[in-house]
Amino acid sequence: MKLQMRGQLRLEQKMKLAPHMIQSMEILQLPILALQERIEQELNANPVLEINEAQDSEELAAPESPEKTAAEADLDEALPAERVENLDDEYKDYIDRTGAFQSRPRTDEPDAKLEAIKNTAAPAQSLHEYLEDQWRLVEAPEPAKIAGSLIIDYIDSRGYLSVRLEQLHNKDRKDFTLDDLNIALSLVQKLDPTGVGARDLRECLLIQLDQSPDDVSFERKLIAEHMDELLENRLPDIAKKMSCSTEQINHAVERLSRLDTSPGLQIGPSQNHHISADVIVEYDDESGDYSVRLADSALPRLRVSDYYSRMIKDNQISGKTKHFLQNNIRSARWIIDAVEQRKNTLLKVTTAIVKYQKVFFDKGSLYLKPLPMAKIADEVGVHLATVSRAVSGKYVQCSFGIIPLRKFFSGGIEDTNGNEKSWEAVRVKLRQIIDSEDKANPLTDGLIRKKLAENGIEKLARRTVAKYRKILNIPTARLRKKY
């Protein structure tokens, strides 16, 4: 077999996305808060892009004033130093002919950005910093102090010590011993918040009980000796071993429920992320139907600066300057078109969703119908991927609260009456059945399946019931039993 190199021509077709198409898809996928941040970045990066501030009707009707615009007044700020170098000397004559820049009159109104910085909350103190601040004030031998600082380094965000003490003791270290680690751990466990430094749930609860001013001897014995049985809800077995009634154990469990199983989460920054609705659906009493509008009042209206649009038409500017302005004007128009396209697509998709899910907006989650994305894509006249991007990370505000747009898309089954029910509606019905059960004799998954069949949902396997029960974080029948 002979190996050789040779040239060969081949015709082929490829689909290549243009840069503005890629940008449009990225903008479409952004939620409202991320879009605000993206627009702010574009305003800072592109000097020809500016906010289209509202003007009085008289100003709109009046002929163009010889007075310079706001963009002209802020030219030095809009063009960084390295970009100013691209303007050649010939354009200086153009600036001289148009007149000196006139700055906008300053008012007594406070700077919005400065006020926002002043009103921004300081970063929350982390749990590690909070414990270290307390540990500096603890009186202990120097080896124990060193060991305590090491222990604090290994306390996780929930407040638990994530390693064994034996792992922290290195034979090569001479500054503390294993006994020092034990002394330090007992001191760390006395720090605030109560329960921090525990190695498991049992120890966490015992620490909190030991620091309680009330008589909790019964609860302490219950946790220390019967924790595993308590977690398995074997209250009769515990009552027999402790020679007490199940009522006493229930009272103890009620008091124990007030303890914190994750004390470390009391300190540190919140992990909750702010959610803002992208679309608002409201009922119109006059038309008797639902109206859909975008929640984009906080989004700035963008435009290409008139000043730079006139500048690029001047024949006296150099090629470099004109090329620089052309690129930025093109980029500004792309972002403006992408934002407008996002608004139109999101509005059309949500309107189509409201049309198919009108019963949901009337009566709630139990009446949510199965809805494939392909159906909405055909209704709007776009590709399936466009609908997927349009609803990604977006939320709709309605009378039932703020709901993810993706919630409206799911499969489902038909009930005995021929009505379509989504899987979300099935889960809502399942929760209703469990909430109404007799807690002294809770329903097993098989009995829940029979209850669903009585409500018209027959084609559902027992394992599917168990799967949906786990999705809803509902424990098994034995753990739900009340004695």
Image (cartoon, rainbow, N blue to C red):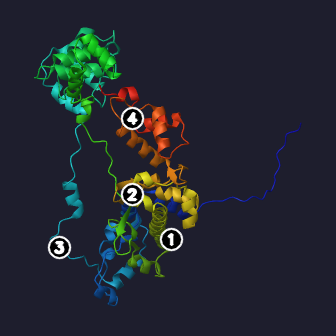
Q: Nearer the viewer, residue 39 or 473?
A: 473
Q: Earlier along the polypeptide chain: callout 3 or callout 2?
A: 3
Q: Residue furthest left?
A: 213
In the rendered view, does 22 fall on the left or right side of 151?
Answer: right
Q: CA distance from mark 3 to mark 4?
A: 60 Å
Looking at numbered disc 2 in the image, what kind of residue is underneath it?
Answer: Lys
Instruction: Tell me, yes or no, if residue 392 can be seen here.
Output: no
Quarter assignment of residue 306: bottom left
Mark 2 is surrounded, within 10 Å at the Cα level, by few (under 14), some (14 to 19) or many (20 or more) other residues, namely few
Residue type at mark 4 is Ile
Tell me the residue that label 2 is attached to. 363
Which residue corresponds to mark 1? 323
Q: Amino acid at mark 1?
A: His
Contact flag, marks 3 and 4 (Cβ < 8 Å):
no
Look at the numbered disc 2 and give the secondary structure of its residue.
helix
Closer to the eye: label 3 or 4: 4
Which numbered disc, 3 or 2, marks the residue closer to the eye? 2
| Front tag of 4 and 1 | 4
Q: Which mark is residue 107?
A: 3
Q: CA distance from mark 4 to mark 1?
A: 63 Å
Q: Mark 4 sits on what residue?
A: 474
Q: CA distance from mark 3 to mark 2?
A: 52 Å
Question: Which x, y percent locates residue 278?
Answer: 38, 60
* Residue furthest to the front: 454
Label 2 and label 4: CA atoms lie apart by 24 Å
Mark 2 or 4: in front is 2
Q: Given this view, does label 2 or label 1 mark the residue nearer the observer?
A: 2
Of the numbered discs 2 and 1, the one sitting upstream in the chain is 1
Tell me residue 79's x, y (percent).
37, 67
Quadrant, the N terminus? top right
- Badge 3 or badge 1: first in the primary sequence: 3
Category of crowding for the residue at label 4, using alpha-carbon neighbours closer than 10 angstroms: few (below 14), some (14–19), many (at least 20):
some
